[in-house]
Amino acid sequence: MKAFQTEPLFLWYDYISCPQLERRKFYAADPSDGSNQANAINSIPGYITRCHFFLALCPTLDCPWEGKVLSALSWSRRGWCRVERAARELSDNGNWILVQSGAAIEMVGTAISFVPGSVGEAEFSVAEDRARLAPVMRNIVLQKLTRCLQTGDMPGFRRHFNLQSVHLRRLEIEPVCLLPSADAAPGGPNAVTEFLHQNGFRKAGKADAAGWRPLHYAALAGNVEVLRGLLEQRADVNCRTSKDEPALGFPPWLSALDLAVYYKHHEATRLLLEANGCLKGGTAPAIHFAAITDNAEGARLLRAAGGNPLAQNLLGFTALQASATYAAMASMEEMLAHDFQSRPGPLELSQALWGATAFRGGSAELVHRLINLRADMDFQFRVSRDLSWLGRMFSAAKSLQHRLASATLQTAFFYHQDGSTPLMQAIQTAQWEAAAALIAAGARTDLRNSRNRAAADFASGQSIPCFLQMGMDGDPVGCRRVSALALADGYVEAYM
């Protein structure tokens, strides 16, 4: 904040800074016709890299004439927004700031701390824009790889060199290759030799400074040929990373199967399962990683191999909760489509609804789906019941930190979570669409958590939308309108 107050501030606003009305014959990023628009688009990574602060302005806005509601969730799905986010997260300073209202401002530090997704898989109003952004995205990756080599960050180079299969997914463009080939013939051990050469490894079984082995990097890429070759050379399919990876938001003790599932490499997942890859994880079962990236096919493969949607991570959260937490509707439906013995009951469904509103999953569609499945919209979270012993210890430590030391959004979450309802969580996390959907469905506003705070107390001091303020005051009409508008098949009457 001191920099905002004491130093000159120059703003670069993407829409305003990029010419919008040029009539052109070439694709958007092609500057050969002298286009200012093309120059502006190609400069996006450069501006974002040089910015000290990157802010995503994502208020919840109802747009009845377009038949939708705009929010942080819709921002996360837009292709142009994803390329800007990728440019930031692949820069030297990957942190950015999410602004959902005047009071709901938070720092986003890692790729996994927000709804994940690649540029090529995003939504585009103009389908041709996907191809237009391909060279821009490739240049972002090239700059990242070059910086890693210049600074001697080989683990970082390996991560993003192999993640090109994800960064450039569905973008018809050749990946970056900075090293000359080792002239290995395709197939068999030679594929492994080339892989080790391109990644700067000397041995197939040795971990690097980041605690990752070649098998883990091959899983990042989803390279089935290399994975098979490494396994044939007796690589341990269940070897785990020994260190965390803060830039990607990964904890330690990840397996190749966890990584393949997280990045939606289905053939690699099949191969690792055939090689007896372990479904039980270090900090979470493999099915959790399918859940948070909306990997329905990966969840199906793991479920067929014996994975359980109700399996818990170290803190006590289930894979079903994980999918709801990230608004991962496809993977959540896969979690629900299983046999009677492991079918989630009202408690598990209610926990999932609470988890969705506590993090990034607060869409009206997800709220309505879970309520229709018998989730309790007035469910009150209990630390003693809904967390593991480790989760309870962690919650107690964060609550104590909130009271005695520095108060943050994270510590406030744990301090107030016992007895909290989905509506309280939706308001506390500024997920106005979810709050509207809950009020429209009849959620109670008079319940109080263990700190004697009601939903209105969390709204106090926040700049909440008018429709939500009306709903909190007992008039649900505006919330019903927004909730209906947000649903894929919602119908809204417009009065002139």
Image: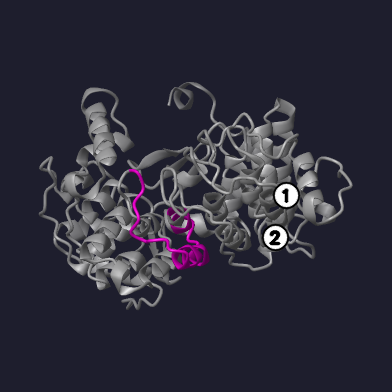
Residue at (19, 51) in percent of width and height: 381
**Coordinates of residue 237 in the picture (x, y in percent):** 58, 49
Q: Are marks 2 and 1 in contact (CB under 8 Å)?
A: yes
Give the amino acid type for the residue marked by disc 2 in the picture. Answer: Leu
Instruction: Point out the tag, 2 or 1, that comes first from the N-terminus.
Output: 1
**In the current view of this chain or complex, which residue is farthest to the right?**
183
The CA distance from mark 2 to mark 1 is 9 Å
Quadrant of the rendering where the C terminus is positioned: bottom left
Residue 190 shown left or right of residue 49 in the figure: right
Give the amino acid type for the residue marked by disc 1 in the picture. Answer: Arg
Q: Which residues are magenta?
A: 288-314
**Coordinates of residue 32 in the picture (x, y in percent):** 84, 54
Label 2 crowd (10 A; few <14 / some 14-19 / many >=20) = many
For label 2, the residue is 171
**Coordinates of residue 378 in the picture (x, y in percent):** 17, 60
Quadrant of the rendering where the N terminus is positioned: top left
- In terms of depth relative to the viewer, which is nearer, 334 or 360? 334
- In terms of depth relative to the viewer, which is nearer, 394 or 365? 394
**Coordinates of residue 31 in the picture (x, y in percent):** 80, 52
Res 160 → quadrant: top right
Residue 202 shown left or right of residue 246 in the figure: right
- Residue 222 colored in magenta in the image: no
Query: Taking 34 as reference, is 345 above or below it?
Result: below
Q: Secondary structure at mark 1?
A: helix
- In terms of depth relative to the viewer, which is nearer, 154 or 405? 154
Q: Which colouring convention does the figure follow?
A: one colour
Residue 177 shown left or right of residue 159 in the figure: right
